[in-house]
Image (spheres, rainbow, N blue to C red):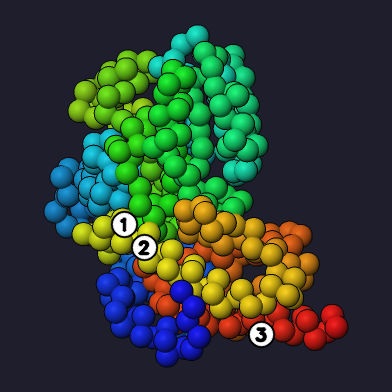
Amino acid sequence: MWTTTRSAAAALDRTDVLATLQGHYDLRPDVIHLDGNSAGALSSTTPAQSGTFAGHYRCPRSMPPRQGDDSRPETHRVTNHLAPLLGAEPGEITLADSTSMGLFRALLAATRLRPGRPMLVLGRHGFSADRYLARSAADFVGGELVLLEHLRDLPDLLGERVAVVALPHMDPISGAVRDSAAITAEIHRAGALALWELSHSAGALYVDLHAWEADFAIGCGDKYLGGGHNAPAYSFVARRHHAAVHRSLPQDEGDRAAGALNPLATDFAGTPPMPSISGLHESLSVLDGIPTSALETKTSALIELFLGRVDRNHGTGVEVLGPSEEDRRGTQLTLRHRHAQYLVQSMFACGILVDFVEPDIIRIGFAPTWLRYVDVWEAAEALNTALDEVSRHSG
């Protein structure tokens, strides 16, 4: 998508079927958020709703009790909104305290569903907390954690010792989207279970856990789902595993009673902050009825526009690390430049938020919900200007 002028980008906005979504987010007019892969924009009604929710529980007798002051209805409302974005049923999803703890619980559950298989496989390029808790899960069951460096090495690892393979749907380095259905099928043929991390996918890409035949999934609500900082995480367990998962974990009498209704309520829930759950509900309601295929189509178009504007500056030393043209694009572009920190600072001075990763990486996240084509055009122009400045001083 080679868009040479701002007016051409504005024309794309006028025909964008998702254009009205931007008005539902709390955005400053002088800031362009291209860091949704770190923390997304809040819906405009989230702060007020979270305050209202907190006020009710601070003075619970100031108004009629809400179903006996039970907070579970809030969780159910969120999972009802979240399920279509994941290609799942509401009863297969629960909210959790953190993605890393969701990973820990899912890995333990997987080892119990695959007894006699001591090996847990985890993608290497995730959060350090994930690696720590995955290693803790392996130690807890007397097993072994193997960190997968490259996806091409997976076939050599799979075998009768592997209980579960946990991978991100989007490659965190290249930004390419993985063929989760094909990879899950390969994992299943080896007798293992598949766990998908969706933090950088849900709310911006096509996700269908049922079509993939995924066993487990985890993710957070603070990125493209728009829940903001401290948003709850979520866990998915395929319904076919519910009974076995619930039987495999230690229970007290209260757990058994709650688990009879929904095994995930006791086995995977944790204790997320209730005001944040209420806030996430507001953000997810913005996406009601939006096909995830439409979200991915716009995400890809935004990236194509950006690349079309920046490609002419390859001579200035900027390297596009991914995704490559033959890959299915995710939500993120990864650029390398020896003056990356200066480039990021220059963009920040123009009100454009991107991520800098030492020593020379720029990560740019493209949200189909709160970004316009004009925003992406302006961000590319700001980067071009900074690249030209670097070239002049380097020359």
Task: Choose top left, top right, bottom left or bottom right for residue 257.
Answer: top left
Q: Position of residue 38 (x, y in %)?
A: 53, 59
Q: What residue is shown at x 52% (from left), y 13% (from top)? A: 160
Q: Name the element at disc 3.
A: helix
Q: Position of residue 86 (x, y in %)?
A: 32, 46
Query: Which residue lies under the disc numbered 2?
Result: 297
Q: Residues within 10 Å of mark 1 (few under 14, many from 20)?
A: some
**On screen, residue 97 above or below 302:** above
Q: Name the element at disc 1.
A: helix
Q: What residue is shown at x 54% (from left), y 17% (from top)? A: 159
Q: Nearer the viewer, residue 110 or 99?
A: 110
In the displayed structure image, the side of residue 177 where residue 151 appears, left or right: right
Q: Position of residue 366 (x, y in %)?
A: 47, 66
Q: Residues within 10 Å of mark 2 (few under 14, many from 20)?
A: some
Query: Which residue lies under the disc numbered 1?
Result: 293
Query: Which residue lies under the disc numbered 3?
Result: 385
In the displayed structure image, the side of residue 80 where residue 32 appears, left or right: right
Q: Nearer the viewer, residue 83 or 258?
A: 83
Of the two numbered discs 2 and 3 in the rendering, the one whose residue sits closer to the viewer:
2
Q: Amino acid at mark 1?
A: Ser
Are the residues at dot 2 and dot 1 in contact (C-beta closer than 8 Å)? yes
Q: Nearer the viewer, residue 386 or 95?
A: 386
Q: Earlier in the sequence, mark 3 or mark 1?
A: 1
Look at the image and tell me whether residue 93 can be seen: no
Q: Amino acid at mark 3?
A: Thr
Look at the image and tell me whether residue 309 can be seen: yes
Q: Earlier in the sequence, mark 2 or mark 3?
A: 2
Q: Amino acid at mark 2?
A: Thr
Q: Position of residue 221 (x, y in %)?
A: 41, 53
